Image (cartoon, rainbow, N blue to C red):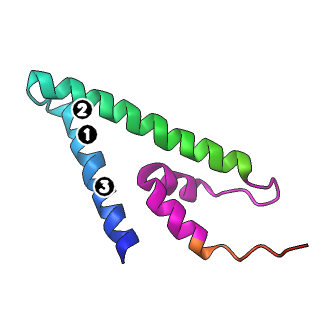
Amino acid sequence: MLINLGRLLMLCVWGFLLTNLFHPYPKPLTYFINVALFFMVVMHGLQLVLLKSTQPKDQPISRWLETKIFIFGVFEMLDWQKKQPPLKKK
């Protein structure tokens, strides 16, 4: 329930940031939103790269899951983590 609320919030944030590209806000605000959009793309990309680098080679992540992780960030990671089977101890 809360993860879906977080996903909805993340879609609203993406929408707000991308709206600035097509219909710029007034001058001082548009610079802040451009920086926030750049920061969001870099941080979600970094999160995805770090996840892919820690995954075993025999368990690749699908493109659809990569896209969802890039868009929703930590909310998709939490959902994905809950669906993973627990690790067996040696």
Disc 2 to disc 3, C-alpha distance: 15 Å
Q: Residue furthest left?
A: 26
Upstream in sequence: badge 1 or badge 3: 3
Disc 2 to disc 1, C-alpha distance: 6 Å
Q: Residue 69: x percent and y percent?
A: 51, 54
Upstream in sequence: badge 2 or badge 1: 1
Q: Say the numbered circle drawn on residue 11.
A: 3
Mark 1 in CB contact with mark 3 (< 8 angstroms): no
User: What residue span does the magenta drawing correspond to?
Assistant: 55-81
22 left or right of 68 in image: left
Q: Residue furthest right?
A: 90
Kindly identify which residue carries mark 1: 17
Q: Residue 84: x percent and y percent?
A: 66, 73
Residue at (85%, 74%) from the top-left corner? 89
Identify the image quadrant of the N terminus. Answer: bottom left
Kindly identify which residue carries mark 2: 33
Q: Amino acid at mark 3?
A: Leu
In terms of image quadrants, where is residue 31?
top left
Identify the image quadrant of the C terminus. Answer: bottom right
Q: Is residue 68 magenta?
A: yes
Mark 2 in CB contact with mark 1 (< 8 angstroms): yes
Disc 1 to disc 3, C-alpha distance: 10 Å
In terms of image quadrants, where is residue 7?
bottom left
* Residue 55 vertical position relative to residue 90 in the rendered view, above or below: above
Q: Say the numbered circle drawn on residue 6.
A: none
Residue at (43%, 37%) from the top-left corner? 41
Secondary structure under the numbered disc 3 in the rendered image: helix
Q: Residues within 10 Å of mark 3 (few under 14, many from 20)?
A: some
Residue at (42%, 55%) from the top-left corner? 72
